[in-house]
Image (cartoon, rainbow, N blue to C red):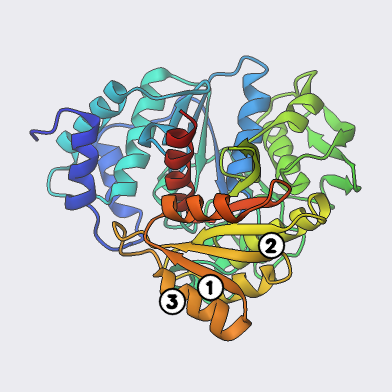
Amino acid sequence: MPAKTLEAWLEHLEHAHSKPIDLSLERAAEVAARMHLRPAGKILTVAGTNGKGSTVATANALLRAQGVQVGVFTSPHILSFNERIVINDTCASDEAIVDAFEAIERARGDISLTYYEFSALAAATIFERAKVDVWILEVGLGGRLDAVNIFDADVTVVTSIDLDHQDYLGGTRELIAIEKAGVARAGAPCVVAESNLPQSLLPQLRRIGAECVCVNAQYELTVEQAHWSGTWQSSEGQVSLGGVPRSALLPSNLGAGVQSVLSLGYDLPRNASTLLTDLQVPGRREVRVVQNRTVLIDVAHNPAAIHALNEYIQTRFAEKTCRAVFSAMIDKDTGTMFALAADTISHWYLPNQSQNPRVARALDLKNVLVGTMGAIASCYDTVAQACEAMWQESQQDDLLLIIGSFTTVAAFEVWADETEN
């Protein structure tokens, strides 16, 4: 394999291993077996439609505050592939990732792996070499057949279950729940953060033999306008936190992260309430000031995420005029997303992303917004052009949204960095 740099490796993987999604554990499991990947530490696997990132970040923050050595695998990344593989809050180096890719390449032989499978195996290789105490693995798609599920988790979390990726996971919440539940293991805790349970979820977890630890059953959350509180299970008995100030992140995901740490057998750090209040996750309800404008950045790219984001805006920014740069993948239910946000967002700025054929065309999105809903929407060739227009047309008191796919947020970050420096 001639590729030596990480950039060259990623280019190779994008071209040679970018086949259509083919959910299967067999390929990655066989390569992991050839590499003798055997995690020495505990594993926490997080599945769900939305909320995985904030749950992962919560568990990591609580563990790191106690000095636990933690490896975190998430996807996709925003700006740098290295963001996917983090050890003790530091992104893996190019050299470490390249070494892992080379080891995978030697082991795979004639087995064809996807880009994502290479990523997951690279993370596992790096975590094993670093001998971290806990692996936190975020599911990429579904759960049962996701590559991270080749590793038996000591604790699992199912955050939320809603309609997304129906072509791969099924067309109902009940079918999707079965796929999410597939990360659970017999005799191991599965933290269920979903309060509106699909009828199939708990029966499936019981068939697997998992120990169900459900919100408002085995652990309790009380959410008020300004604060939230919780009481969780631990090996030593109940653990409580009261009056935690609400932040941009949902208490349901924070609470699930707390329970996952306790289920792993760890305590909570003394400053847990402060950590939960101050926790921020890039691209998840991230509020910043850019060029004298308040900006809300969120990778909300399905109806459930837009619904939750809309509620957050109505609670915190109800008096502001909202404008949005939005783009999403072609298979997303953009019509429902637009309808949910119709009373919140007054102007839509729709960029094309011609370098990615999976992204919906701006004109198609505009036709839905203008033709069906009578909204105000404009098309642009790039995310940068859409941002320029939104900033020029906005008022200082407006709330400017960057929402949709990770690629939309990534392009905004590049534009914001170039205009501020």
Q: Which residue is mark 2?
A: 202
What residue do we see at 29% from left, 56% from top?
Answer: 355
Among the 4 quarters of the image, the one containing residue 304: bottom right
- On residue 364, the disc is 3
| Image x and y of residue 220, in percent | 86, 46
| Image x and y of residue 86, in percent | 46, 28
- On residue 405, the disc is none
- How far apart marks 2 and 3 lie (CA) works out to 40 Å
* Dot 2 amino acid type: Leu
What residue do we see at 69% from left, 56% from top?
Answer: 309
Among the 4 quarters of the image, the one containing residue 62: top right
Which dot, 2 or 3, sits closer to the camera? 3
Q: Quadrant of the N terminus?
A: top left
* Dot 3 amino acid type: Asp
Whether residue 393 is visible, yes or no, is: yes
Q: Of residues 92 and 403, which is closer to you in this image?
A: 403
- On residue 333, the disc is 1
What residue do we see at 24% from left, 28% from top?
Answer: 98
